[in-house]
Image (spheres, grey):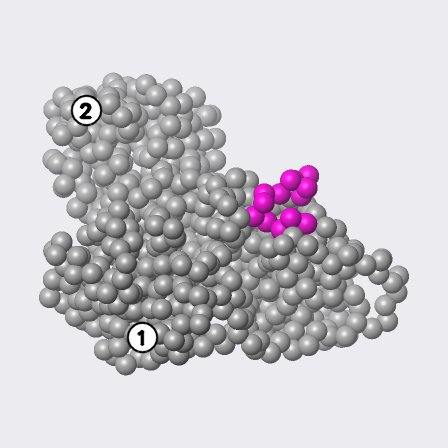
Amino acid sequence: MSGPPWPQRSRAVLIGAATYEHLDALPGVKANLEDLEAELQDPEVWGLDTRHCSVTCDPATSKQALAPLRAAVREARDTLLVYYAGHGLIDPDGGGLWLALPGSRPGEAESVLPYDWVRRALLPRRAERTVVILDCCYGGRALGMMSATESTSALADSAEVNGTYLIAAAGETVQAVAPPGERNTAFTGELLALLKKGVADGPAVIPLDDLTALLTRALRARSRPEPQARGRNSAGKLELFRNRAYAPPPDGTRLPGSRYQVTGPAGTTDGGAVNLAGRDTLFDRPVAIRVMRPEDASDPAKREAFVARLRARARLTHPSLALVLDWGEIRQSPSAAASAGSRVRCPYVVTEGFAGGTLAEWKQDPSYPYFVVRTALEVLEALQHAHGEGVSGWHLSPDRLHLTAGGHVKILDHHEEQSATSLTDDIAAVGELLHTLLGNSLHSAPPTVPGDLEAVVARARRHGYATAADMAHALERPSGRVVPVPGPRPAHRTHVPAAPAPRPPEPLPLQGLLRFAVGSHPGRNGHRNEDSAYAGPRLLAVADGRRGEAVAAEAGQVASAEVIAELTHELGQGLTRQSATTALVIAAKRADRNLAEMIARDAALDGLATTVTALYRSGHHVALLHAGDSTAFRLRDGRLTRLTPDPTEPPRPVRPGPADEAPEPPRRDRAVTPGRRTPPLCGTAHADPYTTSFHVRTGDRYLLCTSGLTDVLSPRRIEEVLAKPGSPEATVRLLVETALAGQGPDDITCVLADLVAPPDSDVTGTPPVIAGAVADTRRL
């Protein structure tokens, strides 16, 4: 997600300790809270409602400090801001960060608020972005100084919450100043000054990295400690506060009316168009605007060609292509050489906008080769879709491919002049993309990427693949063998036939058959069952609906039933044009949009949410999609493996195992960071679920379950139950009964499937099974 936060769906929690019984007082902290609250509620900065900005000064206990935070975690959908100012202490045993309270004593754990408690309180959040600001250090003197005895970099690393951008007020072994005689502490004082004055010649909304850089520059100029920030990959590109000093660009780049605002100076110019960053004020979302230059729009032939490409572009709906939102015309004057008053009709197109970084800015990590290959496959899937609609000639260089916050690639724009060879030029550009990003590592790529990756790239750069699907097939082939590279392409080509229109393929043959069972129980909470589940020969899925703050009692049931119904609409029969992973993502996004439409029609549903975890089989592979806190496990050779990320574990790279069980290259960085939490579907129409895929093996046992099971049973206990001999039906009953015996209060839902070798008369022809809310509401 990008753009300034939506005030109605955002929350801020401000916590501070100014007076202490055993530590020096910090009078500036109280002023920090008062002034920051006022700025956050100012519409020119954020415009938070008073009810959505909680301020707690001098909390007596950690429970009192955490109570408003827990409430905000439940309520925030867009942005959650958490701010703390006061003394920071060091855990003498573990070295962690303690946030001091008025009664805190150094070394006494029962008297402080451990930052780890704050981190844990943030884990169940549903906000799409979270910002934590810590204006504190370890231990210290009062009035003049708050001392730091250890590195604030270490603080940022240890205190980091997945999906959170953290700003710490001081650097390594540097004292954070609370200047005597000044109203605020040094760091918060500069933050308030920036929010009040704005940034001259800056963007309309200030990204987090820019905010940190501006604060660093201001504090350095006054010889004060410099802050440090931590975020994952493109998190620093996310925009937070509006810029009071923003001045719109010259009249030549304005669009008619007040709906679309240009949020910065003109971006790149290519061919006959100018690319701009903008904002849709009607729906409060970022957009990309592409306007034809007046000099080119004055040529009727060029203008007609531009409009024709816009119409073709608008037909494309692939998730890796930025969606066309609107188009129109504006009147602009050509260059100064033109006669005064002469204005030309210039077509423009508005597409999705993204504040995340480009592919060229992506930080390399142990998963980088996998990420690059999977990104190339996403691009090739998008090209196959676009070529089928007759649209080619795309910008595919790393600096022109954008990434969402979740790591998905987005192709924003294309060349204005379409040459006769642009179809194959697109595919060659993918080869250039791989060559540029992987560079010298092509010949030493990890074993779980295609063995002949270098040959595939070389062939693509020579225009050796006729279609995007051909190159994708070569990248996905596990054998690593490729077809011999043909000779150089002809110097001139008079005609290139258009790619045939895509048609639904036959379902791929399955490796083994599934024997499955489903069980669902409303638990001991006395409420109606809000879980939904489905099991069939190709698709397994669970969803845990949440009512949240929705007025309607059935909101959770509606949410879970809707996502299961959408997943099974086509995927239950294996009828899809896309790859397994793409098909799952499209279905999940469609379900999220449906929820958004339901909320728009019925305000009583606002606040609903649902988790979703699904496995979809295609050939020898299984694609997994995950959002929220439901879980998928695999039991193989008596050993239980968690297939979905565990938000309670720290991130770590995945080390490939034997070739027959190593996962395929992940679609994004989340596939190798178990600690990252993916928010559930909340009807925001901005769903970005976690996905990955892997090989299947006869004898595998797969379990999909909601948190009603995992909150009660440990992974070890689940492994013991799954390892016992028994049919899926018997095992599901045992899991549910065991959870109920453990006083499971929440809905408990399990989908269990065994992969067996055909023929098996007990499996062949088994009809799909549904359970929970989706069965109660008859959504299928």
Badge 2 amino acid: Ala
In what element is the residue under mark 1?
strand
Is 226 or 417 nearer to us in this picture?
Answer: 417
Q: Which residue is drawn at 28% across and 81% down?
A: 778
The residue labelled by disc 1 is: 769
The magenta span reads: 439-453
Is 443 or 14 nearer to us in this picture?
Answer: 443
**Can residue 441 be found in the magenta stretch?**
yes
Q: Residue at x 24, y 72 (%)?
A: 772
**Can residue 466 be found in the magenta stretch?**
no
* Above or below, comparing residue 670 to residue 567 in the picture: above
The residue labelled by disc 2 is: 25
Badge 1 amino acid: Val
Number of marks in the image? 2
Q: Quadrant of the N terminus?
A: bottom left
Cα separation, mark 1 vs mark 2, equals 63 Å
